[in-house]
Image (cartoon, rainbow, N blue to C red):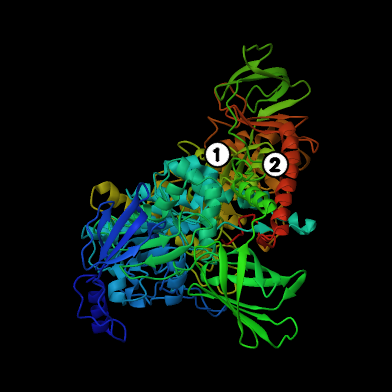
Amino acid sequence: MKKNLLWLLFLCTSIITAQEYFPKDDGVKTPNNKTIAFTKATIYITPTNVIKNGTLLVKNGKVVNVGRSVSIPKDAQTVNLNGKSIYPSFIDAYTDFGIAKPKRERGNPNASPQYEPERKGYYWNDHIRPETNPIADFKFDAKKAKDLLKAGFGVVNTHMQDGIIRGNGLLVSLNTETTNAYRILEDKSAQYLSFTKSNKSKQMYPGSLMGSMALLRQTYNDADWYLKGNTKNKDLALEALDRNKNLPQIFYAGSKINAFRADKIGDEFGIQYTIVGGGDEFERINDVRATNATFIIPINFRAAYDVSNPYLAEHISLHDMRKWNQEPTNPKVLAENGVTFSLTTHSLKKMNDFNKNIQKAIKYGLDKTKALEALTTVPAKILGKSNIGNLQVGSYANFLITSGDVFDPKTTLYENWTLGDKNVINDMNVKDIAGNYALALNGKTYDLTISGKDAKQKGSLKLGDKKIKSKFSFKDGWIFMSIPSENDATKFNRLTAKITDSPVITGKSINEDGNETEWSAAKIVKKDDKKSDAKKKKDDSSTPIILPVSYPNVGFGLAQQPKQETILFKNATVWTGEKEGNLSNTDVLIKNGKIAKIGKNISARGAKTIDATGKYVTAGIIDEHSHIATTSVNEWAQNSTAEVTIEDVVDPNDVNIYRNLAGGVTSIQILHGSANPIGGRSAIIKLKWGESADNMIYNNSPKFIKFALGENVKQSRSQNGTRFPQTRMGVEQMYIDYFTRAKQYDAKKKSGQPYRKDAELETLAEIINKERFISCHSYVQSEINMLMKVAEKFDFNINTFTHILEGYKVADKMKEHGVGGSTFSDWWAYKYEVNDAIPYNAAIMHNQGVTVAINSDDAEMSRRLNQEAAKTVKYGGMSEEEAWKMVTINPAKLLHIDKKVGSIKVGKDADVVLWNTNPLSVYAKPLKTIIEGRTYFDIDADLDKRAAIKAERSKLQNMMLHEKINGGKVQPPSKKVKELFHCETLK
């Protein structure tokens, strides 16, 4: 087996280099060493270098000369291509051609999860597979090759689409006349990466997108450590990763937001990935441009949705409907913004749709030269190849022969040459005879209609209003027809005609008795038809109606980012959250994104003045414990995942951001879930609706991490959980073990000795060094005590116990330890360890001197945290002022952002809310929610948005109905529902 593999590798690395001793297929084949001259053609040497009436000279599978004045050797075969065009064959830089993706094995649902790797001698995680070389698995797919050749492709770049680091790819010619030894132009064309796990392994980690990102970072760090010779073990995966580092690095992202995530990792390690996008780049084009990446763009435009049932149509999101309308503009937008990109067939269900979609993209504004570059020179550049994607001297003879403009729907692709071998797509000698004719035979005039293209042209016949059953064929330039006799349907007139350049078809007819007569067919061109054709041409070339993109491109998105304003609230009731307390009939001036003045009778030239008489101005609500605006919430596959961070998976498109703004929320901490004792790092963000994820995250954000206690981490409710720990005392021991290791790691790091960078232990060392704060999911008082003692053992403090529904039992100990409590107002009994919860919890902790916040842990509750705070007045007798602090300044203190936000104070960020009435009232509504002087929610604008959304949905649905009625493709309404995360979500 090893010998066979080595032999195959040798074959594939000896490409097109005097391999005459290899047999070709099973029969006798004359070597392709003829010289062929293609003359009088329009030749696209490159997309921007076009010559008219040129000659292309080909020999031994390569271009030997090209130009207007080419000397043609005497022994050359000459092909006259007068009126025709020659283009370089297309290149697809991202396929799985000939390499089957392994299927995920269905395991026993009751089997224990797999946490350890299966392979020996490779990296500790089975989803890291840079050593994969798919050459042994490659099988030339003749059927798929035929489809690709018809679409204009001559070369494809293929790989095993499996794993996070997937190994190298193969550059393959689609030549059907030769063997793999000749077809494979490069056996290590690129290295491939993704965020998706391998189907070859059931290893649980990573279990989330943020886990995949953390694993990639750690792999790069470990590869660097290994390369420097710091380990005694041999690791074949890391060695392969090092070997492949100089190859083009192609990263499958599949969406714009994942493209930004991939680029972020690349920037961290000095790698510029070529990114396989998702076709939605137009929605964030400025951020796409800022990556400086080259993109490989799928062109799989979605079909219209079937909206004929108005009730089902209501379940289609505006975002999905918009994308149907806007997706075809994506290539145009990329080109106009200077983003270099190639196009791929990846994810197309039908290859026939590729050229149709290219034509659609051109109709939607894509420049034809840019389209040709995206299929030839750009993919060649991505792969570092100068001898494909062009027809310069020395390049492979991969080219198309067409009847005209390759992107014109009426153009016929005649031949696709690969490595100098001809693949006939349509016979170029077949004339186009489609049209309506008046056929004269034996004194009668028939209506003959010929339709179709090339050799597939077919005819139908009518005599007056009566359809005549006839047999029509068109082959090798000859028409053959059989027309039944008028008097006897069992007898036929047999018609033949040789097609010439004459506008009238003439030929011979032999009747049932063997007598020969002449027949003719004159083409009919009506004036009405000319007008109709002109109108149709005008309609086809008309500019499609494209709806504008919003930020984010969903319902309630913004047409443009709000501008920072100078705003003066006059005569408001101001709840400062500071020692000044609540102020009546007071003005607040916002300027340059800050609170500039608080007082009476303030004036400011040029300020936008708002009469706040009878209204309330407060600081924006801060949610200490949220799970909105994230793509994934739990990296559950290990008992410690301190290496992952929610900052990697912030989702700026989540409509819950807007809904929270409508509830007066301006800042949140997005916490990792509670699947493991040591979870991931947090993201503290401002709800700047319409901004990118990075622009939402606080500058110089305080560092937090999520810990968890109780039922979730010991897998009490898991049927097949086997991961350590399984008991509460195991949880304690796990903390001690990890902090001991982190302390040792930190000591070595500080000693100046070489050390292996470990993101997990780096994070835990930050806790010990009091550089990172713990927010811990907690319920039972015994565990709360336990974790405080563990922290004190390692000389640090727990920052916040979140949930903390038994906090009232240990409030004095919490005060002594210096830990805060972030709790629910009145949740209890939703699982066993919450049975002792009481609604007086917040007040009791507060009365003991603990800093207390009310949090949501819920996408719906976070929109009414003002009412949740009000419950502490009812349960516990809190004052309105202290109750309000529990959702403003107190969570700000717990998050260490109280110097910036959480109260109305001169110099703080202008994150403020204007309420219609007392904020603790059930009737209270935010009228305006402002962040840093920018209005992100306005109740009047919201009403306008609702009306606009209704009108836009109606417009899009009418456009889709028009598409369906006119025979366009439609798909059923999507049934996707966005999941709302909370602590219990294991994803």
Quadrant (top left, top right, bottom left, bottom right) of the C terminus:
bottom right
**For the residue marked with disc 1, what is the amino acid?**
Glu
- The numbered dot on residue 865 is 2
Residue 859 at what x, y percent from top left? 66, 49
The one of 202 and 169 positioned closer to us in this rendering? 169
Closest to the camera, between mark 1 and mark 2, is 1
**For the residue marked with disc 2, what is the amino acid?**
Leu
User: Which residue is at a point 28% across and 69% down the rendered structure image?
Assistant: 236
The one of 633 and 836 positioned closer to us in this rendering? 633
**Mark 1 Cα shell of 10 Å, populated few (<14), some (14-19), many (≥20):** some
Q: Quadrant of residue 56?
A: bottom left
* Kind of element beneath mark 1: loop
* Kind of element beneath mark 2: helix
301 versus 650 height, above or below? below
Residue 385 at what x, y percent from top left? 29, 57
Count of numbered circles on the image = 2
User: Which residue is at a point 59% across and 43% down the rendered structure image?
Assistant: 552
Quadrant (top left, top right, bottom left, bottom right) of the N terminus:
bottom left
- The numbered dot on residue 691 is 1
Q: Is residue 164 visible?
A: no
Q: Is residue 338 visible?
A: yes
The one of 948 and 526 positioned closer to us in this rendering? 526
